[in-house]
Amino acid sequence: MRSPPGAGLGLKPEHFDEAVRAAAPGLWFEVHPENYLVAGGPRLAWLEAVRARHPLALHSVSLSLAGEAPPDVAQLRALAALVRRVQPVRVSEHLAWSRWEGGYLPDLLPFARTTEALQRIASHVAQVQDALGLAIALENPSHYLRLPGHTWDEIEFLQELARRTGCTLLLDVNNVHVSARNLGFDAVAWLDRFPHALVSEVHLAGHSTDAVLGEALLIDSHDAPVAPEVWALYRHFVARSGPRPTLVERDGKLPAFDALMQERALAHDILRRATLPQAFA
């Protein structure tokens, strides 16, 4: 019998030793592969030690799939080598761009959803999947302003990318909340329209308010606990669509490993309850 989906944590070097020793039902870890695109060394050895104990996923941040240029060949070759080495359960990337004229920018930048962009991104996704020998998952981005030039609805754009490439989708619930607040749409209605059958992974994270605009602009900062509003959206998604492997992300103001495990346990309990018969949930 196949085990139900579990909840995982974004793994940081500060927590490697505790992660290796950790034991919890359904626990898995996710890392940014850019930190491990090397032939050897202590960090890669630590990652292999974690992989020997727990399932591992790779969440890329620099393939720049929405950029004008195709994915970097050398980077793809190194990523493919890491995939072969650690055999991740999933590989994912963002629907954004971060590379321009050979230089990398420290952000995940937006683009106009046009048919030209759809064709370009589909080609880039296909190149990545061919290089890795597997389907990747694409994450819905956070939005901070109303970008002009869109000719595609966001959800329809994601669905069409999946149809053309065979990729799956990574649903970041915090991104939905942040975008809904910043752009003024209904997050629950957006989630209800999302193609749930295509979701292979869910992300939960914390956010912050802008230093100048305050609550008028939320920032997907990953430096705080998951907000109550995001937990509510997550429960709504799971109740409507069933459990999916779920990651709790934390990239800044890193707390103790035990604190992250407690937050991860909340997500795992929601998944567990979703797999139980209603009378016992």
Image (cartoon, rainbow, N blue to C red):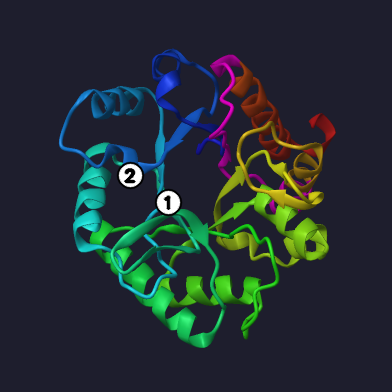
Q: Nearer the viewer, residue 64 or 105?
A: 105
* Percent position of residue 211, x then y: 72, 44
Residue at the left extreme of this rendering: 39
Relative vertical location of residue 93 with respect to residue 162 in this rendering, above or below: above
The part of the image, by quadrant, that contains residue 265 is top right
Which residue lies at the image location 54% right of the left edge and 19% below the top edge?
A: 24
Magenta-highlighted residues: 236-258
Residue lying at the far front of the rendered structure: 212
Residue 88 appears in the figure: no
Residue 174 in view (yes/no)? yes
Q: Amino acid at mark 2?
A: Glu
Distance from label 2 to label 1 (Cα)?
A: 8 Å
Question: Residue tagged by mark 1?
Answer: 61
Is 39 or 220 nearer to us in this picture?
220
- Mark 1 burial class by Cα count in 10 Å: few <14, some 14-19, many 20+: many
- Say which element carries label 1: loop
Disc on res. 34: 2
Task: From the top left corner, tell me how far across and down residue 173 is, in percent.
Answer: 67, 50
Does the magenta run of residues contain 239?
Answer: yes
Where does the image place residue 164, in percent across and percent down from the top left? Answer: 44, 77
**Which quadrant is home to the C terminus?**
top right
**Residue 124 lies in the magenta-colored region:** no
